């Protein structure tokens, strides 16, 4: 069976700086299961639509799989009809965050045959076996499929209990050198999945089942770092995951492994303000961590509660103050324009992040967006902040660009006032 995996562009304007781990791991799982797999990474190469059409016309595939986040929604409105034109009769599987967060709508809007919901490594192999043989799709957990004019969703797929079997990345499947060049020397390393938090703005596609936190074995992650550190000029490794510092034991084991092998690298981690302590910071410092990111989000206790962050401003102060003793670069995430935001909460944020700046933290600013699958998205629809859902989804690729232009007003202020006040806050937080 010949399978084409497609990674559509998330944005037509931003250079890609890392591979799609979802597509990559699916490809490696299928190759390991004996399937003939080809990847069309439109996002990585920024292929034009005419190029994609010619590519599809030449190919002869049995199954076509597509994966990505919700930002590919508008591109799918062109791609899927084009697949039907160039490869008539071939079945289409949609996966990734978009299939999990908009599962019903994807079947309504797009002419797809199947959807893979949540983690797909095990599901995709089981689904393909049923396509080849019995076609008893109700036996496959974690999918959606069409049956007699209806869309059927099966029992949710449990999360993989561990990430022990997640393979080291096969760099022959994606243009790693291009990503490193675009990223000016930094490289992402997949470390962890899941998050204990329940923030109302964050969609973790695996939360359709649970929020269990799992890590790849520390030695395996270090193996990957060692290989790529020898082969490429990596200035900074970025460990990816919702909250790298949650597991103290993993941090210590990872740090020890780096030190034992004498790997003189620099790396960056993300953390919640309530999952850091002196012991973890000491190990991070010893093993080469030069940057830590805290998702603080706001300086308003009111907005923190609306976000359901599960942390407070006192913890943020403590985390920044403590981290600065050990880590050279401390970055704090700032989200402006959240639902409930007003002049008062914006002032609180400006004042608070200036205070953290005096402690040595650098703010990185983004404007609030409502992503499908989140509590915030549902409230934005209910309250009429998103007036036309289809139009909103069709522009998600543009809405997500970090250009500091207010594209969705979720605040309590009229549009012009919100734009003015948020622009003022950004100016005060830029140094």
Image: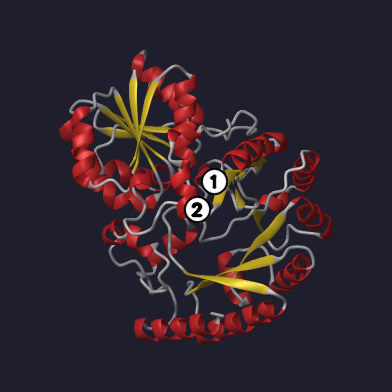
Identified at 54% across, 34% down, the residue is 169
Nearest the camera: 290 or 67? Answer: 290
Distance from Cα at disc 2 to Cα at disc 1: 8 Å
Identified at 69% across, 59% down, the residue is 290
Identified at 45% across, 54% down, the residue is 182
Badge 2: how crowded within 10 Å, few (<14), some, or many (20+)? Answer: many
Can the viewer see residue 120?
Answer: no
Give the number of marks.
2
Residue 255 position, x and y percent, is: 77, 46
Identified at 41% across, 86% down, the residue is 420
Residue 160 position, x and y percent, is: 59, 32
> Could you tell me which quadrant the N terminus lies in?
top left
Q: Quadrant of residue 406?
A: bottom left
Callout 1: helix, strand or loop?
Answer: helix
Residue 413 position, x and y percent, is: 42, 83
Residue reaching furthest to the right: 279
Label of residue 203 in the image: 2
Q: Is residue 428 left or right of residue 294?
A: left
Callout 2: helix, strand or loop?
Answer: loop
Q: Do residues under tags 2 and 1 come within 8 Å of each other at their CB atoms? A: yes
Label of residue 345 in the image: none
Vertical comparison of 2 with 115: above or below: above
Residue 111 position, x and y percent, is: 24, 38
Q: Mark 1 — residue? A: 207
Residue reaching furthest to the left: 85
> Could you tell me which quadrant the C terminus lies in?
bottom right
Vertical comparison of 281 with 180: above or below: below
Can the viewer see residue 400?
Answer: yes
């Amino acid at each position: 069976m010949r399978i084409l995996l497609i990674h559509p562009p998330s944005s037509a304007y931003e250079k890609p700086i890392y591979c799609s781990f979802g597509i990559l791991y699916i490809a490696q799982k299928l190759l390991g299961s004996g399937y003939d797999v080809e990847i069309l990474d439109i996002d990585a190469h920024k292929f034009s639509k005419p190029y994609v059409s010619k590519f599809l016309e030449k190919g002869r595939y049995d199954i076509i799989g597509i994966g990505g986040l919700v930002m590919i929604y508008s591109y799918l409105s062109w791609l899927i009809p084009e697949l039907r034109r160039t490869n008539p009769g071939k079945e289409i599987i949609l996966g990734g965050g978009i299939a999990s967060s908009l599962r019903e709508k994807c079947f309504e809007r797009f002419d797809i045959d199947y959807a893979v919901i949540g983690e797909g490594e095990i599901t995709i192999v089981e689904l393909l076996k049923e396509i080849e043989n019995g076609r008893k799709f109700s036996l496959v957990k974690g999918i959606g499929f069409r049956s007699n004019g209806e869309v059927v969703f099966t029992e949710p797929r449990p999360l993989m209990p561990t990430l022990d079997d997640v393979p080291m990345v096969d760099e022959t499947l994606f243009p790693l050198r291009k990503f490193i060049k675009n990223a000016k020397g930094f490289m992402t390393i997949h470390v962890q999945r899941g998050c204990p938090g329940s923030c109302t703005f964050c969609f973790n596609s695996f939360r359709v089942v649970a929020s269990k936190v799992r890590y790849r074995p520390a030695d395996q992650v270090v193996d990957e770092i060692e290989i790529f550190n020898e082969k490429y000029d990596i200035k900074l490794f970025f460990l990816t995951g919702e909250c790298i510092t949650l597991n103290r034991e993993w941090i210590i084991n990872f740090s020890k492994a780096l030190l034992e092998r004498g790997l003189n690298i620099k790396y960056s981690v993300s953390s919640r303000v309530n999952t850091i302590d002196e012991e973890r910071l000491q190990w991070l410092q010893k093993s080469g961590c030069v940057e830590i990111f805290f998702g603080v989000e706001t300086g308003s206790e009111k907005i923190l509660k609306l976000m359901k962050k599960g942390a407070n401003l006192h913890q943020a102060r403590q985390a920044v103050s403590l981290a600065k003793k050990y880590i050279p670069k401390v970055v704090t995430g700032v989200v402006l324009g959240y639902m409930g935001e007003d002049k008062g909460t914006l002032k609180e944020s400006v004042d608070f992040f200036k205070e953290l700046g005096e402690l040595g933290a650098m703010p990185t600013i983004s404007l609030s967006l409502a992503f499908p699958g989140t509590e915030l998205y549902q409230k934005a629809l209910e309250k009429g902040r998103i007036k036309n859902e289809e139009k909103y989804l069709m522009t998600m690729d543009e809405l997500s660009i970090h250009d500091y232009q207010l594209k969705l007003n979720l605040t309590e202020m009229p549009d012009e006032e919100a734009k003015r006040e948020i622009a003022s806050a950004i100016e005060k937080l830029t140094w």
